Image (spheres, helix red, strand yellow):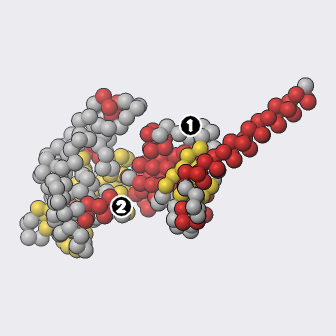
Amino acid sequence: MDKTFFSSNEGKPITCKAAICRKAGEALVIEDIHVDPPQAYEVRIKILCTSLCHTDLTFWKLSFGPISRFPRILGHEAVGVVESIGENVDGFKQGDVVLPVFHPYCEECKDCKSSKTNWCDRYAEDFISNTRRYGMASRFKDSSGEVIHHFLFVSSFSEYTVVDIAHLVKISPEIPVDKAALLSCGVSTGIGAAWKVANVEEGSTIAIFGLGAVGLAVAEGARLRGAAKIIGIDTNSDKFELGKKFGFTDFINPTLCGEKKISEVCYQISYTTSYILRQMELNKRYNNLLIH
């Protein structure tokens, strides 16, 4: 990174390109925008890589309600590098590679300190504000001076963005950015669903509907937790081969099940597995008896 460029823009607005959504459902437009310097507890980052999540599409189409605001810069899965920091920022410095995340972590409330939940009691209920500690104040303006709204406190469809430290995680610069970006939402959501929410037990059988990024991540979480049987269910059979790399052991294409219900096919797979494992255990015990 060009540190001369970073230092010369520290404390000043930056002009850069961003993909702006002007109206619900309309194509994004690449425009020049102004990005203000970070305030206290904020960091301005240069986006290195960003990806598209289905949540972006949902909010792009949303045309009513308090969280439907335009113009807006979407995007919340990304990796960036710290360009400058505001006051009272600890743990981050210029040049750090960081992962912006939509879910807040204040580090101080009872829930953030708990090993059983990550639903920040201090911040997590607020999905309306543009900036975490400054309400509707925005760090973005277009070339005519019009305010541009933030999205989930990240707004990664911009060359530069400003993020509160409650939404930042420092990561190793050795991780490929195109892989790391998915940790912002898809991978963490999927692995967390298996590891924390479902609390998958060792030796269990689970079924996962949909083999997109989140579904594959759920499988990885289940594999790490020791699931014996991980059944993938998707209408696109082409995903099955890829799914094996993430721990899937069996696959069901609902369009090929005939008159059988998916639940019946899952039960059949689960029952067969249980029977085989039981037979293996009985054989093991029998062989031990012969030895002794």
Q: Helix or strand or loop: what does disc 2 sit on?
A: helix
Determine the residue located farthest toward the top in the rendered image.
Answer: 292
Foreground residue among 194 and 140: 194
Q: Where, by quadrant of the figure, is residue 282 drawn?
A: top right
Foreground residue among 236 and 254: 254
User: What amino acid type should be assigned to the residue bearing mark 1?
Assistant: Glu
Q: Is residue 56 left or right of residue 275?
A: left
Label annotation for residue 54 = 2
Q: Is residue 214 left or right of residue 55?
A: right
Considering only vertical position in the picture, is 238 above or below 99?
below
How far across and how far down the image is residue 208, in percent? 51, 52
Determine the residue located farthest toward the front in the rendered image.
Answer: 259
Q: Where, by quadrant of the figure, is residue 29 drawn?
A: bottom left
- Residue drawn at (24%, 70%) of the image: 25
Q: What is the spatial separation of the Cα atoms under label 2 and label 1, in whole angstroms?
A: 29 Å
Q: For mark 1, what is the residue?
A: 201
- Residue drawn at (63%, 53%) of the image: 249
Determine the residue located farthest toward the left in the rendered image.
Answer: 145
